[in-house]
Amino acid sequence: MQSRVIEKAASLLESGACTRVLGWKAGAFFYDVTPAVFTCAQEVREQMVFNPFCGANLSKYLIAESRKEGRIAVFLKPCDTFSFVQLQKEHRIARDKVWAVGVQCRGMCDIDSLKELGLKGVTAVEEAEDDLRVTTLYQEKTISRKEALSPRCHTCKSRKLLDCDELIGDQGQDLPSSRFAQVEALEAMTPEERFAFWRGELSKCIRCNACRNVCPACSCEKCVFDNPNSGVQNKAAASSFEENLFHIIRAFHVAGRCTDCGECTRVCPQHIPLHLLNRKFIKDMNEFYGPYQAGGDFDAKPPMLAFTLDDPEASIITNGRDGQ
Amino acid sequence: MKTWKLSTLDALFAAIAGKQTLYIPADVAGQPVFARWEPGLAMTRALNTGRSAKDLFFPQVEDLARFRVAGKTVSVSPAQALQEPFVIFGVRACDCRSFDILDSVFLAEPADTFYQARREQATVVTLACSQPEETCFCTSLGIDPQAPGGDVSCWMAEDTLYLQANTEKGEALLASLPRLEDGEKPDADSSVFDKLPLKDLDFSAFSGKALMDWFNSPVWERLSQSCLGCGSCTFVCPTCQCYDVRDFDTGHGVQRYRCWDSCMYSDFTMMAHGTNRPTQKERFRQRFMHKLVYHPNNHGGQIGCVGCGRCLQKCPISMNIVKVANALKEGKA
Amino acid sequence: MQVNETFTPTIVAFCCNWCSYAGADLSGTNRLQYPANVKIIRIPCSCRLNPMFILRAFQRGADGVILCGCHPGDCHYTTGNYYARRRMTLLFSLLDFMGIERERTRVEWVSAAEGAKFAATMNDFTQTITRLGPNRRLEDLRCKVE
């Protein structure tokens, strides 16, 4: 896959079809890749990588990049293409300035998953079919690619590549996904247990704003939390209330626009399962207002911008779903 | 040198905690963090905490004063600096060095009294590393992870904890503990440190050369392009020391507090005329110029980084000080 | 459930200018009684209610928050309350998901002619909140008056 991606990137630059390529630059350890813009084919051949650790969603970069001169080529995984479509729906990306190359995906790996397996001091990883040969400071070990998958990829909703100009690999299909299982498990708890769970998780928050800044749905030019006149703090874990406030409001602001790409949880330095808040909204909206997938197409009306005359009343929540 | 059986580490913690507050690196809600020791709290197996040890001297949020309004009177109650002694156990060599860097900022005249009080009240017990992560590069900053410093240095080997007091405070702590036996620690195997991939980083170039050359380097534009502008790197960094002072309107008064700030944020050092770092390029440059160039220029060549590797692990897009330093030296990104 | 005799809750009622606010007026002119600890905040339409307002009310000491707007179909701006309905349903659901007591928030449609319903709603909601006790899960300790 890597050679095909690099060759494609180089040829797009050489043919003049694109002036820039948004791809990945290698780091010191194989897993520490950084999104980067390349402008010449030689540089692409020397420095660009595409490996199982290229997990970050590149769609958000297109907001800024598609406003620059010339056309930019970008390599998008299936879940990135949902964000790509959603951002277009919100008129945040100039489509004609982007050449979207869809790259089929088998699930991406994550260094934290390797650490969960007890691998410490990972200095190099080598891809070999369905295995990863991991070299650490202390041992060499071959693990299956599946074991190294990012947790979000275990509940992948779709391998469809949406709105791409060309594909590398086959077009994929929607997958049967158990992505709401964790939400359901929480719903089954008592309110006291749920409160304790979220207090434990959110009390870890350091208000670094990584979840917000990485989120393709958080595309406001100026965030409400960056407005000092709003009276809320954007960078201080000042009280448990502010932690709740930030995460409730952020989840609410992206409700109906969150494509469930899972970037928020991936980037959280404190490993807070933030995607569960968004997933709860997605599950509720599906249940109350009919199935909807943000970024799934260009036509469906987002549930928070629509209504029907016989929507359920809020009492469905406040009285309890069992009507008690 | 004193010794203690590792199997009864809990008893050592209990003995310390019986006299003063004790913080140890422990897993809380799945995250390694310096937590107040209580019976049953065990040390984390992680090499280092997610947030650094600076939290205990320079917490993320700290009250400075409260103003209360009642009728026509306003009463002011300034916050009190910490008066109680405490012990912080299990500090790694990198974090211990970060205290020196913070000292050079907060203890310079006029000294920060809140920070100063905590430093004076604290007894720092360090712990030598034997199993580094690949992201560790303290050795390239002149830190010896096997001789971690602080008031008391500790080593763990086999089933024994070795303790060596380095200061009067450390002596006093060890003297206050019962049942310490004498012993000599065996020579540790340091071969793994020679295998560290980042052990040969050279930061010496940054303090000598003209500041403006680094400042005007062409690499900043490119490197900063991928930066998301979040504050992860700053907030997990043991040497970042910028803070903001804010007022919170409580409805019946004002609570003035300070909180960590991040140069990665758009409102960092916001002034009446706006911000003087309008794009992410300037903000990004500020962070690394501060660590690599400004700090050594102002503090006798001391680099503002201790090689703990937290930013390497936590950056959402894997941009970090090592990549920046290398790109700067090569002159291309 | 134990009834707390000494606890007087603070209730914030966001009322739509065109219906519930007038409904509150009507209940006043009809001399219907509802608790004085209900603080009414007038908003131009139920869909003006930003979720942040609700959370901030809790932060500043509210024990319960209720939104009153026009009956579905009667919105002064035709459709505002339909949007409000979706938003509040989702918000309340998330609060419940996070373990905040689900009875602490409520939506009730009250027209300008329903003075009696307004008073009855406030009496009932106040009773519910009194039974629930003070808001602890969404409080901000900094805002407590010592």
Image: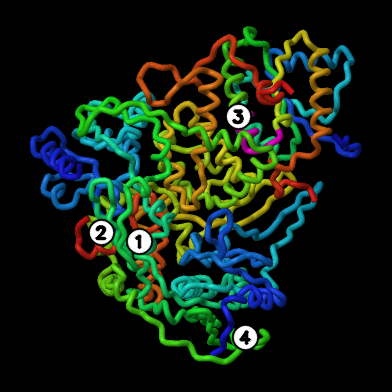
Quarter-of-image position of residue A92: top left
Which residue is rendered at x = 58% and y = 62% of the image?
Answer: B59
The numbered mark, 1 or 4, whose residue comes first in the sequence reads 4
Q: Would residue B279 be counted in the magenta stretch?
A: no
For marks 3 and 1, give the one nearer the viewer: 3
C-alpha gap between disc 2 and disc 1: 13 Å
What segment carries the magenta color? C91-101
- Give the residue type that dot 2 points to: Asn
* Residue A106 in the image, given as x and y percentages of width and height: 30, 39
Q: Nearer the viewer, residue B168 or A81?
A: A81
Q: Which residue is mark 1?
A: B288
**Both marks 2 and 1 on one chain:** yes
C-alpha gap between disc 3 and disc 4: 55 Å
Q: Which residue is mark 3?
A: C91
The chain holding disc 4 is: B
C-alpha gap between disc 2 and disc 4: 52 Å
C-alpha gap between disc 3 and disc 1: 41 Å
Find residue B174 and name its label: 4
The reply to whether discs 3 and 1 touch (Cβ–Cβ < 8 Å) is: no
